[in-house]
Image (cartoon, helix red, strand yellow):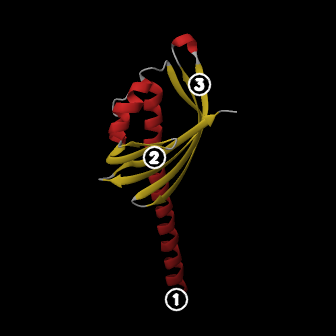
């Protein structure tokens, strides 16, 4: 009887550690999507960014409804990035909560934009909340809301 109980305890422990490893891998995969998006913005290139989003994504920025990511990219973000000399993130932190097949994230950061005219610099503290969904084995951003204020 003691042997059976010990075997059951060992199986539960093994199962729990395997589940924790799977959750850890999912969190890393979610956060990699966010890092890839951030890296794309910093490169000032829009190539491949739409692959990180669901086709029916929703983008909200500082109180405005921007539509899908493709619309946002074509009418707002893309033209903006084309006018920047540089765009860099610092003090980046992310918190991720999983509820498969969804992930909920909160990012905080400081971003610094340098404009070409006289090297004018804009520095803001930002926050982004996002919902990602795992589709066909890949995490995609389905909704994101960003806002910012002048950095202190």
Q: Residues within 10 Å of mark 1 (few under 14, many from 20)?
A: few
Q: What residue did someone put label 2 on?
A: 144
Q: What residue did someone put label 1 on?
A: 1
The mark closer to the camera, 1 or 3, is: 3
Report whether 35 appears left or right of 90.
Answer: left
Q: Earlier in the sequence, mark 1 or mark 3?
A: 1
| x and y percentages locating residue 128 in the rendered image | 53, 44
Q: Mark 2: which secondary structure?
A: strand
Give the residue displayed 58% in from the left and 17% down from the top. 120
Asked whether 119 or 46 is in front, the reply is 119
Asked whether 152 or 99 is in front, the reply is 152
Q: Earlier in the sequence, mark 1 or mark 2?
A: 1
Q: Mark 1: which secondary structure?
A: loop
| x and y percentages locating residue 145 in the rendered image | 48, 46
Give the residue displayed 55% in from the left and 41% down from the top. 147
In the picture, the quarter occupied by the C terminus is: top right
Q: Which of marks 3 and 2 is nearer the N terminus?
A: 3
| x and y percentages locating residue 110 in the rendered image | 60, 34
Q: Please determine whether, in this image, residue 131 is positioned above or below residue 100.
A: above
Which quadrant holds residue 71? top left
| x and y percentages locating residue 30 in the rendered image | 45, 48
Asked whether 8 or 94 is in front, the reply is 94
Q: Residues within 10 Å of mark 3 (few under 14, many from 20)?
A: few
Q: What residue did someone put label 3 on?
A: 122
Distance between mark 1 and mark 3 Cα atoms: 69 Å
Q: Which residue lies furthest to the top in this view?
A: 118
Q: Please determine whether, in this image, residue 83 is positioned above or below residue 4.
A: above
Give the residue displayed 52% in from the left and 70% down from the top. 13
């Amino acid at each position: 009887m003691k042997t059976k109980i010990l075997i059951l305890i060992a199986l539960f422990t093994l199962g729990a550690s395997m589940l924790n490893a799977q959750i850890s891998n999912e969190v890393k995969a979610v956060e990699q999507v966010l890092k890839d998006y951030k890296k794309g913005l910093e490169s000032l290139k829009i190539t491949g960014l739409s692959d990180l989003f669901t086709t029916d994504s929703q983008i909200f920025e500082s109180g405005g409804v921007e539509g899908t990511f493709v619309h946002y990219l074509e009418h707002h973000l893309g033209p903006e990035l084309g006018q920047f000399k540089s765009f860099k993130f610092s003090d980046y932190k992310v918190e991720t909560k999983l509820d498969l097949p969804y992930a909920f994230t909160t990012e905080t950061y400081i971003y610094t934009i340098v404009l070409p005219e006289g090297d004018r610099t804009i520095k803001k503290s930002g926050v982004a909340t996002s919902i990602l969904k795992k589709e066909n084995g890949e995490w995609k951003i389905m909704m994101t809301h960003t806002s910012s204020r002048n950095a202190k």
